[in-house]
Image (cartoon, grey):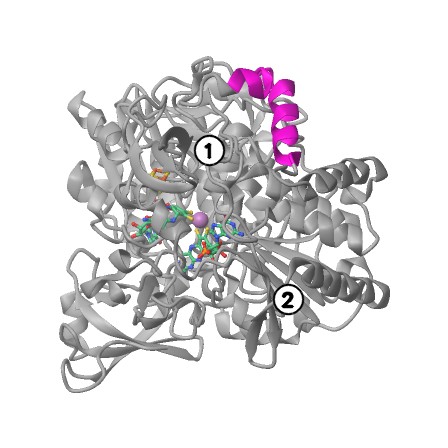
Amino acid sequence: MAETKYTFCRICEAGCGLKLSVDNNRIESIEPDVNHINSKGYACIKGLSLDKFIESPDRLTRPLKRVGKDFVSIGWDQALEEISVKMRDIHRQYGGQSIAAYTGNPIGFSLWPNTAVQGFLKGFGSDKLFTVGTLDCSNKFAVADRMYGSFAHQTFPDIGETQMLISVGSNPKISKMSFIALPYPMEKIGAIEKRGGEVVWINPRKTESAKACGRHLPIRPDSDVFFMLGFLHELIRQDGVKHDRVARYMEGYQELAALAGPWTAERVEQVSRVSAIDLKSLVERYIKADGAVIYSSTGVNQGRFGMLAFWLQEAINAISGNLDKRGGSLMGRPPISFPDKTREPKFSRINNTPYITAGIPTGILADEILTPGEGQVKALFVVAGNPVMACANSDRLGEALNQLDLLVSIDLYRNETANHADYVLPGLHFLERADVPFFFMSAMGLMPEPYFHYTDAVLAPPGEARDEALILRQILRKSGFSFFGSRLLQSASNLGEKLSGLPGCKDGMAERFYGLITRSGKLGGLSQLRKYPQGQPLDPNQPGDYLGQRVGTDSKKVQLAPAEFVALAQNLERFFEQDVADKRLKLIGKRERYSHNSWTHNVSGFVKGQRNSNYLYIHPDDALQRQLAEGDLAEVCANGKCIQLPVRLDSDFMPGTVSVPHGWGHQRADGLSIAKNTQGANVNLLASDGPDSIEPISGMSQLNGIPVEIRRVAASGTGNSTGHN
Ligand SMILES: Nc1nc2c(c(=O)[nH]1)N[C@H]1C(S)=C(S)[C@@H](COP(=O)(O)OP(=O)(O)OC[C@H]3O[C@@H](n4cnc5c(=O)[nH]c(N)nc54)[C@H](O)[C@@H]3O)O[C@H]1N2
Ligand SMILES: Nc1nc2c(c(=O)[nH]1)N[C@H]1C(S)=C(S)[C@@H](COP(=O)(O)OP(=O)(O)OC[C@H]3O[C@@H](n4cnc5c(=O)[nH]c(N)nc54)[C@H](O)[C@@H]3O)O[C@H]1N2
Ligand code: SF4
Ligand SMILES: [Mo]
């Protein structure tokens, strides 16, 4: 008989509650959970289509081993044995630091397997964890670390109370936001206007969100840092600084103000294309609003200066009195405390590139593999990731992966990265594992309405699919090493493994781990949490509880002008001159309702009709100059590489801006029977990698604002106008 199960979606940060009807380990129906504490009956098409991803005929159910160009299915014993033998050899020959891991976005939503990856690496004596954070948000970690004393001190807009939201480089209607758990964001953002407040979108594109509410101010891609400098200049000029608050709770104001000196609204307009009149009036309204906040997301993060732009944004919110204020920006209060102090700074052997939080920038992954010497990466474990689609300069990365002595992919499917792998191991879908909310909620408290919940696994894994954490621990043990390098933890791990070998038993480590951290977080442990599968409320946010109380810096004051940022900001003059003169088209991304990075194109309903490809979006004026018409095949070139795509004319984009959604170009994905037959091209073939291409300190890759050249290849209907790579 069908059973009703309450759980939550772990595809994006909204974390929507879901009500499933499960019969005989099959999902009969999925509904949004109307009684879920936070999402209250909201869920999007991806969450409501989970069954299609779980039950796909392409789902991996047994380990695969490469034999020549093909993969053959093998048993777990053989897979683990062979991989462990190889690992022992690699460790003996090249040392622990030759072993690395790349954790993709989906596994980021599950604390236990993520922790296990760290224990796995540490067990081998390695700290080489490549993190997708350097593709979307490590600029925010670097800033929080310097300004607030911990990477985990992240702010979020008080959407429910604010009188003015300035949203820079985000599109909540499609992406559901980042660094805030906000299901149904457009309803909550729309309510700002309804209560007499204001919403402003700073974006090169008039997005779906900007069409739904608020006012749109187009900005030239990758000029946000100048926009922020102009904003800061105006804020000071218009006397919008709360000097008493600054004096009490902050340090570095004079240096910050000195920096803003030259950046008048008129000057900034030349590069951002936001008119001086608009900027001045925006700042005036920001000062007047009782509770205003600037928020930014990947549109800013993925530019050349994401870290500096975010620093300036935070400084503006702080000195205007909006940080830690009702209706301004709030500092999360995490339900679970993790060690959040930045540990000893670490540097990669590649150009001394700094590590960021616990990881290394993906932008130097190829270099770490290709550069000989001690610590050269020889073995890579990719857990729930697709680096050859997601990372910059995909071709070079693909070539680098081919040089590895061992590449293991642990995934639901055989994706494009698996084309370079020696073994592909079947992992779990999130419905097949226990979880607590995403790290940003659990450990950073980025929740407008704080809550907590725990879910058990609601489905048993198909075939021989196995918990990622167990796989890694088994490889570690068989290779002769211990979890986190600790005998005690290894004994616990061995016990879990033994149990999992008994019929009907589970490893149980995930549950024990969540039990431990929820008890230490005073959340009552699992038996308590199981009583509230639809979520338990936590104490509401309290504006005013951060400044002077919880700031993590040595002086307990917010650092407005960290020396490293000020030094980097001095170079902006030079970039400004260059950018003013730069008339090239700038390429940006575009997230789509039916795409989630690279992994939702293997479901037929998601790629039907025109949705079976990505496109080159271009403003009609820019198209005309290049004799391009709708449906033509165009070539987009940058950094000496080109891709071809069908053209879509779109006047929602600011002239001078073109866009190509990422995550496409699956033609070589033999393990993805539906995605393989889609069209389109991988835009990350165009982005640069290497130590000189990433942002200093934050390690962010530049994926937005890339200068490109475009030319027509074939007119609509005359050639193959459905792109390829
Ligand atoms: N040009 C450009 N590039 C971008 C971006 C952009 O905006 N523009 N965005 C970047 C961003 S924000 C991100 S986060 C990265 C994402 O980068 P990645 O995480 O490397 O890429 P995904 O496409 O999300 O691939 C996820 C893989 O995990 C698998 N998977 C899903 N769930 C599970 C699970 O529970 N267990 C296991 N074992 N596997 C699972 C999927 O099958 C898929 O193969 O891409 C980045 N790349
Ligand atoms: N449907 C869907 N939802 C997703 C994802 C997905 O792939 N599909 N991915 C998830 C992931 S991993 C993440 S990290 C989040 C990201 O969530 P968001 O950060 O909200 O991502 P986007 O929707 O790509 O919004 C970025 C916006 O920045 C704009 N932009 C581009 N360049 C610039 C610039 O130089 N300056 C400014 N000001 N704006 C710019 C773009 O036009 C775009 O509207 O979304 C998550 N949600
Ligand atoms: S909005 Fe995000 S969390 Fe909610 S159902 Fe959609 S993908 Fe899942
Ligand atoms: Mo992301």
Can see residue 718?
yes
Mark 2 touching mark 1, by CB under 8 A?
A: no
- Return the x and y of residue 579 as percentages of the image width and height: 37, 62
Image quadrant in which the C terminus is located: bottom left
Mark 1 sits on what residue? 315
Can see residue 349?
no
Q: Which mark is residue 407?
A: 2
Q: Nearer the viewer, residue 116 or 303?
A: 116
Q: Please, what is the dominant secondary structure of the magenta stretch?
A: helix
Query: Which residue occupies 32% across, 58% down?
Result: 603
Q: Three-letter amino acid code at disc 2?
A: Leu
Image quadrant in which the N terminus is located: top left
Query: Which residue occupies 51% across, 46% down?
Result: 461
Q: Nearer the viewer, residue 232 or 341?
A: 341
- Return the x and y of residue 54 as percentages of the image width and height: 41, 50
- Return the x and y of residue 70 as percentages of the image width and height: 55, 77
> Along the horizontal axis of the image, is 203 left or right of 531?
left
* Magenta region: 508-529
> Along the horizontal axis of the image, is 45 left or right of 402?
left
Kind of element beneath mark 1? helix
Q: Earlier in the sequence, mark 2 or mark 1?
A: 1
Q: Nearer the viewer, residue 256 or 524?
A: 524
Q: Nearer the viewer, residue 177 or 411?
A: 411
Q: Three-letter amino acid code at disc 1?
A: Ala
> Along the horizontal axis of the image, is 44 left or right of 489?
left
Q: Quadrant of residue 101?
A: bottom right
As drawn, 627 above or below 179: below
Q: Decide whether residue 512 is among the magenta residues.
A: yes
- Return the x and y of residue 406 as percentages of the image width and height: 68, 68
Crowd tier of the residue under label 2, counting other residues whose Cα lies within 10 Å: few below 14, some 14–19, many 20 or above = many
Q: Decide whether residue 520 is among the magenta residues.
A: yes
Query: Which residue occupies 53% across, 72% down?
Result: 419
